[in-house]
Amino acid sequence: MKLALKLGASALALTLAATSAKAEGELSLYHWFEYIPQELLDKFSAEYDVTVTMDTFDSNEAMLAALKAGKLGSYDVAVPGDYMVEIMIGEGMLDSFEPSEVSNFGNIAPQWVDVSFDPGRAHSIPYQWGSTSFSVNRDVYAGDINTTSILFDPPAELKGKINMLDSQGEVMALASLHLGIPQCTSDRDQLKALNDLLQAAKADWASFGSDVAKDVLVSGDAAAGMIWNGFSAKAREEGANIEYAFPKEGFVVWMDNVVLLKDAPNRDNALKFMNFLLEPENAAAVTNYAQYTAGVTGVDGFLSEAVTGAPELSPPADQAGEFVMACDQDVQEVYDTIWTNLKK
């Protein structure tokens, strides 16, 4: 009996060792769609002998919902936007790390180190940053596009031909900028005006779609579309005669971040991957692919001409961008109701 117990313990030890060895060679990502080149994942996999798997999402809100629905603990890292990092910290969904655990921490661009949504970068590293606005097909409309009226009170040429991002935070932020009201307002009159604006504008929109935002502009299925600046640059390169707007009322600025998730099954590999992405050459590979802007220093020598000359990456100095805010729970519930009614 004692011999049997010893054999059982040995077998258990071998099983645990095998499981541990397997876990040491894996990394599970939860990432935006079309936002990282496969070649870069392959490079990391070969360099560290790690098998990389990736699932994708198309909005911050979709990512949060999936993690809350039971996916937390299945992934090692995710790539949320700035305001979503703040929300996830508040909900206890992120693990923390020390800068000493990430040897390339010093490569983070100074303006992205001590950020309001993650002071001191205890839970995240910068990935890419950019803007959210809209683009217009110049074969369809030749007038002034640098106004949010293009989306919320469009000219006749664009009515019924507009695609909107399926992104609650960004749509609500642009609508607030259009009205000149603060984000996360609790004022009833302002909330009513926000709801009324969105419901009225909906009649002039053809579709909601984040994953098709680029394609509908290239195909001509949409004459205008709310879009991220990198997607707009890609659509232009693919032949769409579009121009990206920097509206005078303002536009959304965002920073996407790689976060270390709570209960990450492969924490060490997650930190290796985060460190890998802070290498200037690797950060530049993402920029060249996605056409946004890296959050680390030293990338300039690795950037393509398509990126360095892209007008979508050069907002006018006199036109301001604004980050999406994380609202208090009471206000967020009202915003959720407005959004739910808008999507019906």
Image (spheres, rainbow, N blue to C red):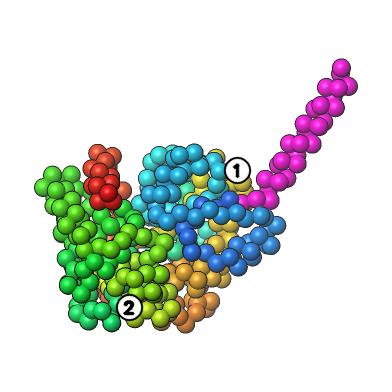
For the residue labelled by badge 1, is the local secondary structure a helix, a strand or a loop?
A: loop
For the residue labelled by badge 2, is the local secondary structure a helix, a strand or a loop?
A: strand
Dot 2, crowdedness within 10 Å: few (<14), some or many (≥20)? many
What residue lies at 50% left-to-right and 41% top-to-bottom? 72
Dot 1, crowdedness within 10 Å: few (<14), some or many (≥20)? some
N-term-proximal mark, 1 vs 2: 2
| Prevailing secondary structure of the magenta residues | helix
What residue lies at 34% left-to-right and 56% top-to-bottom? 166
Residue type, mark 2 in image: Ile
For discs 1 and 2, the disc positioned in front in the rendered view: 2
In the picture provided, is 226 more to the left or to the right than 9?
Answer: left
Q: Give the answer, above or below, for where 2 lies relative to 268.
A: above
Q: CA distance from mark 1 to mark 2?
A: 44 Å
Q: In the image, residue 176 lies at what x, y percent?
A: 20, 57
Residue bearing the label numbered 1: 265
Q: Is residue 264 magenta?
A: no
What segment is highlighted magenta in the picture? 1-27
In the picture provided, is 332 more to the left or to the right than 301?
Answer: left
Q: In the image, residue 337 lies at what x, y percent?
A: 25, 43
Q: Which mark is residue 173?
A: none
Residue bearing the label numbered 2: 242
